[in-house]
């Protein structure tokens, strides 16, 4: 007697995702990342302008964008450097701003933890807000993807986000003051995070964690150099985990 096909219960979209080769998964991730250019390009241009006004040369700007590859911490570091802040404080503050990357990494382990050490190192380097949000949503939507398909999708998303970011920062530095100050390129940062976070608020645990993070960030905004993030982030994670545990126990009680 023939065994039932485990893929018979899949939707057409799931079958299509599972049928992609790693190269096709790469192209799919690349295409899906293109809308982020609407916010990444202005944000990158703005960093290039700010870095130019702070006195950084083009190689230094590109060093920031290629080595650090994290917009928020790049802005923070340049601002502190322009105020002649000690290097140790600049480094500690940039790390504090980027603490969310540790949470991102933990969330990616169930999906990409089985990759080779070299692949995990490259993924860690290319892990930014956009690649994390895109990849996690894609993996949760298609949990049966192979490791090669998951990596291919992530690399495609990274190619569509990270390379344009570096190009935009270089363009911003070269254009410098030619960009009108009234253009308000800084709108890109809040819009980027809203576009990423909005689709991910699908459960009460997600919503509770988001609300706690917002409230805690506002309450501890008086702390210097973004140190309130050290408090807001753990509180949000604990809240989300607590709501998830409470909902699971409630489901078990009702079963």
Image (tube, grey):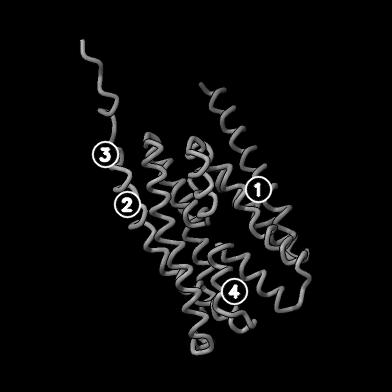
Q: Earlier in the sequence, mark 4 or mark 3?
A: 3
226 vs 131, nearest the viewer: 131
Whether label 2 touches label 3, CB < 8 Å = no
**What element does badge 1 sit on?**
helix
* Mark 3 burial class by Cα count in 10 Å: few <14, some 14-19, many 20+: few
Task: Report the disc number at residue 236.
Answer: 1
Mark 4, residue position: 60
Q: Earlier in the sequence, mark 2 or mark 3?
A: 3
Kindly indicate the quadrant of the structure image that contains residue 95: bottom right
Q: Nearer the viewer, mark 4 or mark 1?
A: 4
Q: Nearer the viewer, mark 1 or mark 2?
A: 2
Query: What is the distance, in whole Å, between disc 4 and disc 1 at their CAs?
Result: 36 Å
Whether label 4 touches label 1, CB < 8 Å = no
Task: Report the disc number at residue 28.
Answer: 2
Mark 3, residue position: 19
Q: How many marks?
A: 4
Q: Is residue 160 left or right of residue 13?
A: right
Query: What is the distance, in whole Å, between disc 1 and disc 2 at their CAs?
Result: 32 Å
Kindly indicate the quadrant of the structure image that contains residue 243: top right
168 vs 56, nearest the viewer: 56
Say if 229 sits above or below 43 in the image.
above
Q: Nearer the viewer, mark 4 or mark 3?
A: 4
| Whole-percent x, y for residue 199 in the image | 45, 52
Residue drawn at (52%, 61%) of the image = 193
Whether label 2 touches label 4, CB < 8 Å = no
- Quarter of the figure that contains the N terminus: top left
Q: Nearer the viewer, mark 3 or mark 1?
A: 3
């Amino acid at each position: 007697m023939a065994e039932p096909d485990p893929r018979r219960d899949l939707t057409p979209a799931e079958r299509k995702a599972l049928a992609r080769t790693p190269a096709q998964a790469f192209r799919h991730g690349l295409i899906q990342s293109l809308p982020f250019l609407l916010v990444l390009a202005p944000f990158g241009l703005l960093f290039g302008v700010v870095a130019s006004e702070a006195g950084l040369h083009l190689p230094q700007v590109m060093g920031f964008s290629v080595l650090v590859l994290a917009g928020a911490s790049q802005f923070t570091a340049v601002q502190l450097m322009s105020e002649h802040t000690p290097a140790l404080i600049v480094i500690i503050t940039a790390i504090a701003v980027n603490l969310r990357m540790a949470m991102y990494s933990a969330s990616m382990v169930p999906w990409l933890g089985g990759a080779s050490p070299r692949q995990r190192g490259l993924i860690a380097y290319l892990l930014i807000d956009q690649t994390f949000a895109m990849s996690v949503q894609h993996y949760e939507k298609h949990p049966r993807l192979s490791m090669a398909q998951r990596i291919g999708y992530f690399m495609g998303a990274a190619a569509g986000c990270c390379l344009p970011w570096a190009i935009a920062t270089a363009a911003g530095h070269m254009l410098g003051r030619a960009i009108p100050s009234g253009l308000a390129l800084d709108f890109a940062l809040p819009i980027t995070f809203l576009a990423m976070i909005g689709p991910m608020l699908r459960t009460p645990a997600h919503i509770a964690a988001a609300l706690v993070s917002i409230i805690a960030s506002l309450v501890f905004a008086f702390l210097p150099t973004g140190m309130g993030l050290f408090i807001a982030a753990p509180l949000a994670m604990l809240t989300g985990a607590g709501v998830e545990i409470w909902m699971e126990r409630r489901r078990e009680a009702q079963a």
